[in-house]
Image (cartoon, rainbow, N blue to C red):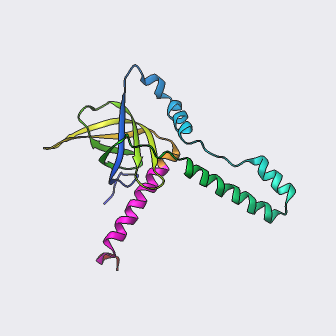
C-alpha cells in the first residue's frame, strides 16, 4: 500500500500554544526571516571556531589538535544542553497527532485557511521547544470535540530534525513496550 506521507505521524502529549496570525500581520511573517531570527535567539548555534582549529593545528601535533578540537565540540554540546529552556510550564499539555510536516490538535477557535504561530514543547530531557508557522488545512468535528489539522509552512531544519528524532524515540519506546511481534520472527 503506497502512502503520500513523507514523515511518520505519532500521537503524543506535548505542551502546545498557538497564536493566530492576522492577514494584516502576515507580511511580517511571510518571508520566514522573523521565524528564523526568533529560533536563533531562542537557541543560538555554536559553530566551530575556525581560528581555534587553525591555532591548534599550528601549535600541537595533529593528533593532539584533533583531540582538543573534538573536546571543544563536546563542551559546546554540553553548554547547549545546559542552556536549553526548561521553563515551558505555561504551555498547556495537549494530546496531538504530529509529524515533521504537520499537526492536528483539539481546537474550537481556528478555521480552515487560518495561519498560526505554533509553539510545541516536546517531552523528555532535555526539553525541546519547536516553533513553526502553520496553515489550517481542515477541521474535523467529532461527537465530543473539534480538531484542526495544520501543515507546517515554515519550520527550521533544526526544528524539523527535533520532530523526527522525537517521533523515532517514541517509536523505539513503543517497540520495547510491545516486545517482539509474531511477524518479526
User: Can you say which quadrant of the picture contains the N terminus?
Assistant: bottom left
| Residue 175 included in the magenta stretch of the image | yes
Which residue is at a point 79% across and 64% down the rendered structure image? 64
| Residue 148 included in the magenta stretch of the image | no
Compared across the picture, whether 83 is left or right of 104 comes to right
Compared across the picture, whether 25 is left or right of 46 comes to left
Which residue is at a point 56% across and 51% down the rendered structure image? 82
Residue 58, image x and y in percent? 86, 55
Residue furthest top in the image: 24
Which residue is at a point 85% across and 60% down the rendered structure image? 60
Image quadrant of residue 62?
bottom right
Secondary structure mainly formed by the magenta segment: helix
Image quadrant of residue 145?
top left
Image quadrant of residue 181?
bottom left
Residue 95, image x and y in percent? 29, 49
| Stretch in magenta | 161-182
Amino acid at each position: 500500500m503506497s502512502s503520500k506521507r513523507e514523515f511518520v505521524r505519532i500521537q503524543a502529549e506535548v505542551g502546545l500554544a498557538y497564536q493566530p496570525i492576522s492577514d494584516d500581520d502576515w507580511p511580517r511573517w511571510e518571508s520566514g526571516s522573523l521565524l528564523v531570527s526568533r529560533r536563533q535567539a531562542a537557541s543560538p548555534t555554536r559553530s566551530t571556531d575556525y581560528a581555534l582549529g587553525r591555532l591548534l593545528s599550528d601549535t600541537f601535533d595533529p593528533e593532539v589538535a584533533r583531540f582538543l578540537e573534538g573536546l571543544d565540540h563536546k563542551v559546546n554540546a554540553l553548554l547547549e544542553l545546559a542552556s536549553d529552556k526548561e521553563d515551558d510550564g505555561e504551555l498547556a499539555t495537549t494530546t496531538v497527532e504530529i509529524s515533521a510536516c504537520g499537526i492536528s490538535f483539539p481546537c474550537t477557535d481556528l478555521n480552515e485557511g487560518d495561519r498560526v504561530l505554533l509553539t510545541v514543547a516536546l517531552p523528555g530531557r532535555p526539553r525541546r521547544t519547536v516553533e513553526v508557522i502553520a496553515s489550517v488545512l481542515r477541521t474535523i468535528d467529532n461527537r465530543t470535540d473539534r480538531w484542526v489539522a495544520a501543515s507546517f509552512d515554515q519550520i527550521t531544519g533544526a526544528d524539523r530534525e527535533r520532530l523526527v528524532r522525537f517521533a523515532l524515540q517514541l517509536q523505539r519506546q513503543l517497540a520495547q513496550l510491545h516486545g517482539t511481534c509474531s511477524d518479526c520472527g
